[in-house]
Amino acid sequence: MTHSIELFSLPADAPRRLAGKATVAVDVLRAGTTIITALENGAASLKPCIDIETTRHSAAENSNSLLGGERQGLMISGFDLSNSPESYQPQIVAGRQICFTTTNGTKAIEASRTSDVILIGSFINLTAVCRRLEQLQLPISIICAGTDGDPTLEDNLFGGAICEWFTQKKKVQMNPAAFAAREMWRTATRQRDLGVSLCETLCHTQGGKNLVKLNLAPDIEFAAAIDRFSILPIFDPRTGLIGTDVDLNGGPR
């Protein structure tokens, strides 16, 4: 079987219609990593919102909600949580809905809305994402968030890791961006063999440099831990919520 993978380096590059596709929305640093962590630590769901006003309004409609997210890497005034994954501790988020907005990541989720299945992926749940994509047997779209409208290496690296996972298992048909991302990942893998960790590589990406400037380097280390979790967040555009595989009855719509 030949698997089809298309990668789009920015939400604006993705087609408006993605019917019949399984899409992975990617923002390694940090929205995707944070969403995965929040659900792993017991959050009931996350409601991604494009702008701050909508996020506040959504939280006001649900007394069990928390406000989470960032603008330009920093916690938003009046919000309960930032976009640092380790701030989403079980004692804070368990059983709560989180209304969530970020500078880049929520745009990638929104661009995925017309897909048949929408997964949230990052290095910390890489294998879980790949295994579900394999089970679905649908053409795959990978939509990267980028940073402030520019493509970012960290998101393309994760997309490349997906492409490499499928390359090792079966024939893969890729668009040029997916092929390039796979080669980036192979380069990063060779560097790891020479002692350059994935965390070090991510620190030198644009997103990584931005976080280092904000003294948020621990978030990069957290995001670089491949397969830290096996949880699989799925976005359901009918409800506007991101839940776990179990929450959404275990499969595609």
Image: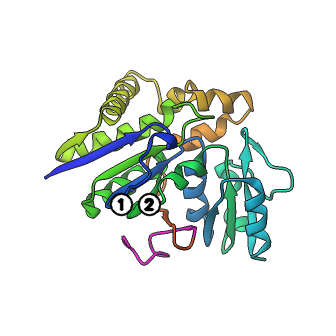
Q: Count residues near mark 1 (Cα–Cα under 10 Å), then give few for <14, some for 14-19, many for 20+.
A: some
Residue 111: image location, x then y, percent: 50, 52
Extent of the magenta region = 240-253
**Residue 42 appears in which quarter of the rendering?**
bottom right
Residue at the location (67% across, 48% down)? 102
| Residue type pointed to by label 2 | Thr
| Residue type pointed to by label 1 | Ala
> Which residue is the extreme one toward the front?
16
Residue at the location (81% across, 56% down)? 79
Sequence-wise, the earlier of marks 2 and 1 is: 1
Residue 27: image location, x then y, percent: 54, 44
Residue at the location (32% across, 28% down)? 183
Q: On the picture, is 94 further left or further right than 233? A: right
Of residues 103 and 170, the one drawn nearer to the viewer in this rendering? 103
> Residue 27, relative to residue 97: is it above or below?
above
Residue 46: image location, x then y, percent: 62, 65
SS category of the residue bearing label 1: loop
- The residue where tag 2 is placed is 114
Residues tagged 2 and 1 counted as in contact (Cβ below 8 A): yes
> Residue 160, relative to residue 247: is it above or below?
above
**Residue 206 appears in which quarter of the rendering?**
top right
Say whether residue 233 is magenta.
Answer: no
- The residue where tag 1 is placed is 19
Residue 89: image location, x then y, percent: 68, 60
Rounded to the nearest angstrom, the CA distance separating label 2 from label 1 is 6 Å
Is any atom of residue 69 visible in this view? yes
Q: On the picture, is 239 further left or further right than 99? A: left
